[in-house]
Image (cartoon, helix red, strand yellow):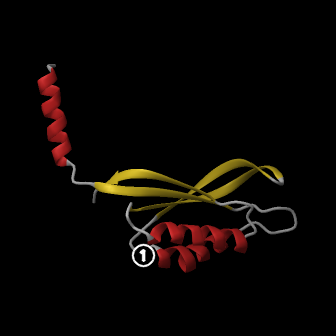
Amino acid sequence: MSGARLALIFLVAAACRTASPWTRAEVYFGSQCGPGCTAASEADWERFVADQIAPRFPSGFTVFPARGHWQGDAGPQDEQTHVLIVVFPSGDPGAPAKLTELRKLYREAFHQEAVLEIDVPATASF
């Protein structure tokens, strides 16, 4: 295929995309905690979603179950985890603060050593 044809295909494909810059945030909420405390139950998680996550992200979010392993202060742990996915416009100043607040609330409520957040640039279109 000639270079001109490849360039034309690329230009047509680029013109079809009307997406804008977004951020995809993944937040990992573990269920286990250190010695002497009770792990977060499924009912605890559902309450946290309804009371804390949904009001902060009424436009939408995705949650899915996962299983993870990590090395914390208490040693290696295998645990059930919930992953929250939120996609928001990169220029939204409120979303990162809401995610930071959620992580803090969860750490305190369920005695978590850490709640991981990963933010990556994304292209999204609806």
Answer with the quarter of the image where residue 102 lies.
bottom right
Residue at the location (72% across, 48% down)?
A: 70
Q: In this view, does 84 lie above or below 2?
A: below
Q: Label 1: which residue? A: 58
- The secondary element bearing badge 1 is classed as loop
Tell me where residue 43 appears, x and y as whole percent. 65, 73
Using residue 1 as the reference point, say whether residue 106 is left or right of it.
right
Q: Residue furthest right?
A: 36
Q: Quadrant of the N terminus?
A: top left
32 or 18: nearer the eye? Answer: 18
Using residue 24 as the reference point, say whether residue 80 is left or right of it.
right
Tell me where residue 12 appears, x and y as whole percent. 14, 40
Answer with the quarter of the image where residue 87 lies.
bottom left
Count all numbered tags in the image, as a single digit.
1
Q: Is residue 54 above or below residue 77?
A: below
Using residue 22 as the reference point, say whether residue 62 is left or right of it.
right
Q: How crowded is mark 1: few (under 14 residues within 10 Å), some or many (20 or more)?
A: few
6 or 92: nearer the eye? Answer: 92
Q: Quadrant of the C terminus?
A: bottom left
Tell me where residue 88 appears, x and y as whole percent. 40, 63
